Image: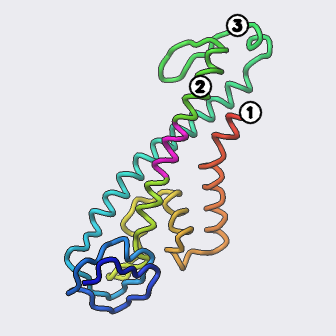
C-alpha cells in the first residue's frame, strides 16, 4: 500500500508498481514511467478525455474572447467623438443582427467581454490542473502530447510543468510567451482602451 506517496517528477523507468494499491494518477505528475508496470486501476483514458473535453470548451471560449476583443477594438476605432458624446449612431451587432446605441454598447460590451474572460480563465485553470497531473512520459514511451488535443494553451501548460523536456527551446519559449500574453492580457488591455 502506497497511499499518499508521491512520485512527482521521479524517474520510474522500468519500475514494477503493478501489485501496489492506493496509487493515484496525480501522484505520478511529471514522472518518467517509460517501461514501468502500473496497477490496472490507473486509467489514463479517462484523464485524457477529461482534458480534451475541457480543452474544447476553453478553445471555444478563447475564440469568443478573441472575436469579442477584436470587435470592440474595431468599434472603438470607428466611433466618432460626436456620436459618443451625444449618443447618436447605432452599431449593428454581428450574428445577432441587432442595432444598439453607442452608449449602450460602451456600457454592456465591456461587462460581457469581462464575463467571457473570467469564464476562459476558469477553464484555463481547470486545464492547467488536469495537465499538470500527467506524467512526463507514459509506460509506452510516449508523452501526453500524443493523447491530448493540440492547443497552444496545452503546450503552454506542458512547458511550464516541464513535461516536454525535449521541446524546451527558445522557439517553444517564444510561443509560450506569445500565448500567455494573448490569453492573459488581451482583454484587460482592450478594456483599458
Question: Could you tell me which quadrant the N terminus lies in?
Answer: bottom left
Q: Nearer the N terminus, badge 3 or badge 2?
A: 3
Disc number placed over residue 88 in the picture, else none: 3
Q: Which residues are magenta?
A: 116-124
Labelled disc at residue 105: none
- Going from N to C along the chain, the mark reached first, 3 or 1, is 3
Is 122 within the magenta?
yes
**93 lies above or below 143:** above
Residue under label 1 = 193
As for residue 106 lying within the magenta part, the answer is: no
Q: Which residue is mark 2?
A: 109
Q: From the viewer's perspective, is residue 103 above or below residue 64?
A: above
* Mark 1 surroundings within 10 Å by alpha-carbon count, few (fewer than 14), some (14 through 19), many (20 or more): few
Instruction: Give the spatial CA distance, label 3 vs label 1.
Output: 21 Å
Q: Position of residue 159 (x, y in %)?
A: 55, 69
Depth check, mark 3 against mark 2: the one in front is 2
Is 129 placed left or right of 108 in the picture?
Answer: left
Q: Secondary structure at mark 3?
A: loop
Q: Where's residue 74, x and y in %?
A: 68, 29
Spatial distance from mark 1 to mark 2, Cα to Cα?
Answer: 13 Å
Above or below, comparing residue 83 to residue 54 in the picture: above
**Residue 66: x and y, percent?**
57, 40
Mark 1, secondary structure of its residue: loop
Residue at 32% from the left image edge and 88% from the top image edge: 35
The crowd level at tag 3 (other Cα within 10 Å; few <14, some 14-19, many 20+) is few
Mark 2 Cα-neighbour bin, 10 Å: few <14, some 14–19, many ≥20: some
Label 2 sits on a secondary structure element that is helix
Q: Residue at x 32, y 82 (%)?
A: 139
Q: Are marks 3 and 2 in contact (CB under 8 Å)?
A: no
The quadrant holding residue 34 is bottom left
Q: Is residue 129 left or right of residue 183?
A: left
Residue shown at 67% from the left, 24% from the top: 75
Amino acid at each position: 500500500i502506497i497511499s499518499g506517496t508521491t512520485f512527482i517528477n521521479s524517474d520510474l523507468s522500468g519500475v514494477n508498481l503493478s501489485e501496489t494499491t492506493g496509487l493515484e494518477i496525480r501522484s505520478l505528475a511529471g514522472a518518467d514511467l517509460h517501461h514501468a508496470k502500473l496497477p490496472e486501476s490507473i486509467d489514463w483514458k479517462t484523464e485524457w478525455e477529461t482534458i480534451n473535453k475541457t480543452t474544447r470548451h476553453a478553445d471555444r471560449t478563447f475564440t469568443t474572447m478573441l472575436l469579442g476583443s477584436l470587435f470592440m477594438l474595431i468599434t472603438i476605432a470607428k466611433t466618432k467623438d460626436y456620436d459618443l458624446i451625444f449618443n447618436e449612431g447605432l452599431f449593428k451587432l454581428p450574428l445577432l443582427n441587432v442595432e444598439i446605441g453607442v452608449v449602450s454598447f460602451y456600457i454592456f460590451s465591456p461587462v460581457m467581454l469581462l464575463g467571457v474572460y473570467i469564464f476562459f480563465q476558469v477553464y484555463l485553470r481547470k486545464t492547467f490542473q488536469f495537465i499538470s497531473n500527467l506524467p512526463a512520459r507514459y509506460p509506452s514511451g510516449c508523452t501526453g502530447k500524443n493523447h491530448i488535443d493540440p492547443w497552444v494553451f496545452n503546450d503552454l501548460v506542458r512547458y511550464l510543468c516541464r513535461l516536454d523536456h525535449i521541446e524546451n527551446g527558445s522557439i517553444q519559449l517564444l510561443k509560450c510567451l506569445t500565448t500567455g500574453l494573448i490569453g492573459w492580457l488581451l482583454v484587460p488591455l482592450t478594456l483599458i482602451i
